[in-house]
Amino acid sequence: PELFRIYGRDDRAASPSLEEWRSWVHPEDRHLTDLRRPGREPQIGDSFHFDFRIVRPDGSVCWIESRARVDGDERAERYVGVNIDITDRK
């Protein structure tokens, strides 16, 4: 629920897909959130840390700090992490 609140979206029971989440990212910052590296898919245990802007449905822009790691049983299945509104800091 907190993720959806920060992003200005309706609360939902399911987590957004990676593609849906990336669609919320400011177009100029989407390259920052590309978690795939050339020639290499994310591996379990990989971690990421980056700041980027999102565009809320009302058109307002907000800065997010994201920290995440790749998780899964036998293959990379999901990203587990935190998104923090850092707009005031920026």
Image (spheres, rainbow, N blue to C red):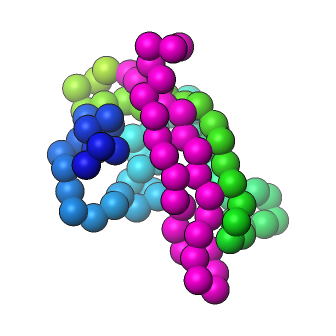
Locate residue 14, reporting x and y percent.
27, 64
- Majority secondary structure of the magenta segment? strand
- Camera-side residue of 49 and 23: 49
How many circles with numbers are drawn on the protein?
0
Left or right: residue 2 compared with residue 43? left
User: Residue 42, percent across and down?
Assistant: 69, 65
From this viewpoint, is residue 36 visible?
yes
Question: Image quadrant of residue 50?
Answer: top right
Q: In this view, does 46 lie above or below 73?
A: above
Looking at the image, is 90 positioned above or below residue 77? above
Residue 30 image offset from top left, x and y in percent? 56, 39
Compared with 47, 70 (above or below) is below
The answer to whether 52 appears left or right of 85 in the picture is right
What residue is at 65 percent from the left and 42 percent from the top? 49
The answer to whether residue 31 is seen in the rendering is no
Query: Which residue appears at 59% of the width and 83% of the height?
Result: 73
For image coordinates 67% across by 48% down, the residue present is 48
Q: In this view, does 59 lie to the left or right of 85?
A: left
Left or right, 5 with reference to 69? left
Quadrant location of residue 52?
Answer: top right
Instruction: Provide the residue span drawn in magenta.
Output: 61-90
Q: Which residue lies furthest to the bottom in this view?
A: 74
* Residue 32 is inside the magenta segment: no
Q: Within the magenta stretch, is there residue 88?
A: yes
| Residue 76 position in % (x across, y down) | 62, 74
Examine the image and state in which quarter residue 5 appears: top left
